[in-house]
Amino acid sequence: MSANPFLDPTLVHGDLYQGDGRLADRTHALHRAKISGSDAADTIADLLAARVPAGAAVLDIGCGRGTTTLRLAYRLRPRRLIAVDASTALLRTTRDRLGDAGPLGSVVCADFHHLPLPDSVVDAAVAAFCLYHSPTPELVVAEITRCLRPGGTAVLVTKSLDSYAELDHLVHAADLDPHATRRSSLYESFHSGNLHTIVATKLTVIDIQHEEHVFHFADATHLARYLITTPKYRITLTGGIPALAAALQQRLPAPPYATRSTVSYAVAVRP
Ligand SMILES: C[S@@+](CC[C@H](N)C(=O)[O-])C[C@H]1O[C@@H](n2cnc3c(N)ncnc32)[C@H](O)[C@@H]1O
């Protein structure tokens, strides 16, 4: 078992993404807290729209609940859209959300280290917020490169190592996890700082963009809703969200509780 929960296969292919609820709750709590920073799915679609003609074949790996997939479907109007994920539950959600765009889309359950696609079949590929689940992200970049046609474009997206570090201090200050500030970043295998190097192992990087996102959790219940979904902390308190919210309210200064994350985008082409 890896010390980093985002690299622990039992957790990644189990509690974290086996069902749709935990990811949906985490995303919802974060979106509600966001006070600055663009919508990542919009940014990815913008980056590709400038480079990919209508009628292209597009691959979205680690598609999760399909938030980016859906945006790609409507913005790029691809001829073919293939969404890959290791979680059948999340692929079901993606397929349902694709709805009207469904006929052009297919969902495929696979490990992104071994994409079940022939060589050189897609014009564009996206890997958003998922390569930090691989201990060897350069192998996934190699797979993406194999599937791209020469000249095809990939957009790879991740977060900075220090994302949400302020929450480590809040969890520690609230006496909920004495080691909260000493745990390694969830994003340690693929992050803003090594994005360029890892992508450049196989692709030609043409642009890297970093954007800071700022979050204000309005009250203790809102913060508890987020904390309960993240595997970073070992919070032993029982009683779920109400008990966690009560502890945070008692032990921390008044809200809002602020944190930040840098979201980084690499745009790269297959030589
Ligand atoms: C945070 S979610 C991605 C969200 C999505 N890309 C988006 O933009 O909304 C991370 C996803 O990576 C998937 N994943 C993790 N390890 C994987 C692997 N080895 N192969 C395929 N998918 C994997 C998880 O199942 C999960 O759906």
Image: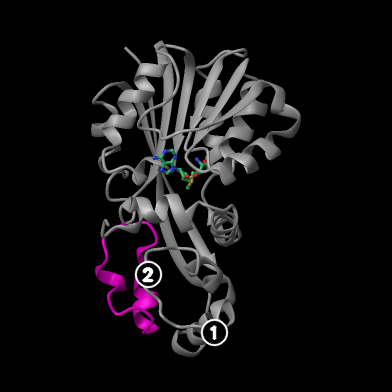
Q: Quick one: SS at disc 1?
A: helix
Give the colouring mode of the picture.
one colour
Q: Disc 2 marks which amino acid?
A: Tyr
Q: Which residue is mark 2?
A: 233
Q: Position of residue 15 (x, y in %)?
A: 47, 58
Q: Quick one: SS at disc 2?
A: loop
- Magenta residues (range): 163-185
Q: Which residue is mark 1?
A: 243
User: Which residue is rendered at x = 47% and y = 40% of the image?
Assistant: 86
Q: Is residue 71 magenta?
A: no
Q: Quadrant of the C terminus?
A: top left
Q: Position of residue 50 (x, y in %)?
A: 53, 20
Q: How many marks?
A: 2
Q: Position of residue 40 (x, y in %)?
A: 52, 41
Q: Quadrant of residue 71?
A: top right
Q: Residues within 10 Å of mark 1 (few under 14, many from 20)?
A: some
Q: Is residue 166 magenta?
A: yes
Quick check: can you spot residue 219?
no
Q: Position of residue 198 (x, y in %)?
A: 26, 33
Q: Quadrant of the N terminus?
A: bottom left
User: Which residue is rendered at x = 46% and y = 33% of the image?
Assistant: 110
Looking at this view, name the residue that lies furthest to the right: 100
